[in-house]
Each structure stands twice: as C-alpha cells, then as structure tokens.
Image: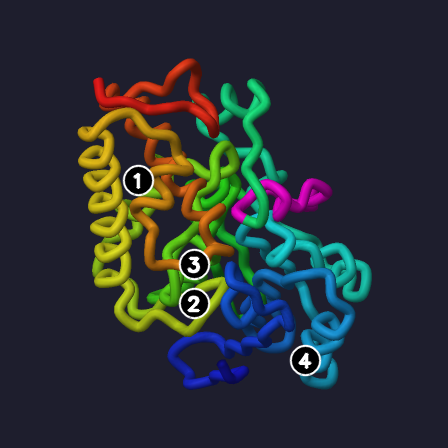
Amino acid sequence: MPQFDRADGSQPRLRRRLAPNPSPLTHQGTNTYILGSGQVAVIDPGPDNPNHLAAILAALEPGEEISHILVTHPHRDHSALAPALAAATGAPILGYGTATDGRSPIMQVLAASGMAAGGAAGGDGLDHGFRPDIRLAHAETVQGADWQITALHTPGHLGSHLCFAIGPWLFSGDHVMGWSSSVISPPDGDMRAYIEALEQLDHPGWTQFLPGHGADITNPQERIRALITHRRTREAQILAALADGPADPDTLSRCLYNDIPVQLLPAARQNILAHLIDLQEKNRVIGNPTLSHNSHFKLI
C-alpha cells in the first residue's frame, strides 16, 4: 500500500506513513496519519520502532512541527511510539484514557474475576503504560492552525477506542477497517458496545474512512452495514450451533471459522466468546459452570 500526501483544498493536507509491522492481525502495517500544515497532528504514531519515528519526522516540511499526537486506542501497534514522538517534538499525547478505561460493567466484572484476553487476539497487545497527557471525552474537539477534529468514543474493539472526525472524513482506527472485521477480545473488547458504536456511525454524511490498517474505505455506510450484518449473521450461526447441544468457544470457533488460517483461530475464539457474553447478557444462552473462556454454553 503506497504512502500518500493529499492537498486538494477541500480538506486539510493529509499524509500517511505505513509502519513496518505487517502481521496477520495488522495487515500491511499500521497507518500513521499527519494532518494539516505548519502545526500538524499525528494520528496513531504506531509501534515503538526508531525507523518509523524517523519516517514520521522526515515527512515534515522545513519549519513544520507536530503540535498534537492523537491516539485512537492503546494497543501497542497504535500507541507505543507516542512517548518517543512526544519526547522528540514536545507535543502532548491525547487519547480517551488507559488501556483498561471505558470497559462496560460486565467487562469490569469479568476482568476482576481473572478473565484476560488471550494471545495476539488482544490482551498482550495492550499498551499498559499508555497515559495520555490530555484525556478526550466523546464529542470533544481539538484544533490546529488549519484543522479541527472531533473525538468520538467508539468502544468495542477496546473500551478506550476513539475515532476522529473531520468534515466528511473519519479516522476509524481499528473499529472499521476494509480488509478485515475487528477482533473483539473480552474483557478488553465488548461485542455489544462494538455493534452499538457501529450503529451510531451509520449515517450518510461520511465520504471516506481512514482506518488504522489497510486501504481507505470509500463506501463507509455500505461497509458499516456489512459489518453489522456480518456480526448478526455470526450470532445466528452460534445460536444454530448450540441448538445441537452445549459447546465451548474453542469448539464453536473451529466449527464456524473453518476457512481461516490456523494462526487466526485464537482471534476467532475471542470473537465467539464476545458474542456468547453478549448473548448471555440478552438471556439467550448461559455458560456453565461460570462465564469464562472454558465455559460450555447452552441455549436458555
């Protein structure tokens, strides 16, 4: 995916630099965006990689400076470079909160009970040291010399996930991507919150989503509705599978995700677990003996 530098006059200048961290869960790498001219904002500085830090700084014009560092969410592939970039530029770091902020009550209970998101699907990707200098609330605006951006709290992939809106553009982080659906890994991720946030973004005003991974999304409303349909379809598949008898998340993931590489099965299991937790909250299923990764779920 090429880098780009856009300056068409209808929106502030936008530059993208791709971090060198490709993987099955990051696609070709993390997209870092540089918004504006003169005094610019960096959105999602990316992983802690000195070469990527150098690439961000090299993208600036002579005399240009970074005035804000905006982070969609504290997963290390998005936020880990923020302290080094702040140290190099003096810019403050802005985000919703820490890696565990924004959890719904049920996710707080599950985290307190010892549930941890497993593997690369979630938990060990958390940037536990992330502390924004400035915390952004939902609908709060941040302004630069030639840009103004609005933070939208969009929990689901992570409780502290933000999207950033500017005119018809949305920097959608990991909440909406074109190349893949998001991993929802409890207790860090929350399926009900994810779908509700998708529904809140479903309106015709957007012309383009700029995601944390992958290419631009030029049909945002169509993409949002496809993601909602995908999740509703997966929920129906889980219920149909449980009609044959109780099953645990491992069994369900192997049954319902039989067309993906084996290395992605842990992420698939987390998505299934997120659906099961949501279904239990809706009184559609119940986990035995308690709600956990290893529960056997049955229909109510």
Mark 4: give few (<14), some (14-19) or many (20+) Cα within 10 Å: some
The residue tagged 3 is 172
Which residue is situated farthest in the top direction here? 289
Mark 1: give few (<14), some (14-19) or many (20+) Cα within 10 Å: some
Is residue 104 shown above or below 3?
A: above
User: Which residue type carries mark 2?
Assistant: Leu
Q: Nearer the viewer, residue 36 or 129?
A: 129
The residue tagged 4 is 60
Where is residue 239? Give x, y as percent. Answer: 21, 33
**Label 1 vs 3, first from the N-terminus:** 3
Instruction: State yes or no: residue 28 in magenta.
Output: no
The residue tagged 1 is 196
Could you tell me if the residues under marks 1 and 3 are in contact, i.e. CB atoms within 8 Å?
Answer: no
**Label 1 vs 4, first from the N-terminus:** 4
Nearer to us of marks 4 and 2 is 2
The part of the chain drawn in magenta is 121-135
Q: Is residue 112 left or right of residue 266?
A: right
Q: Is residue 14 visible?
A: yes
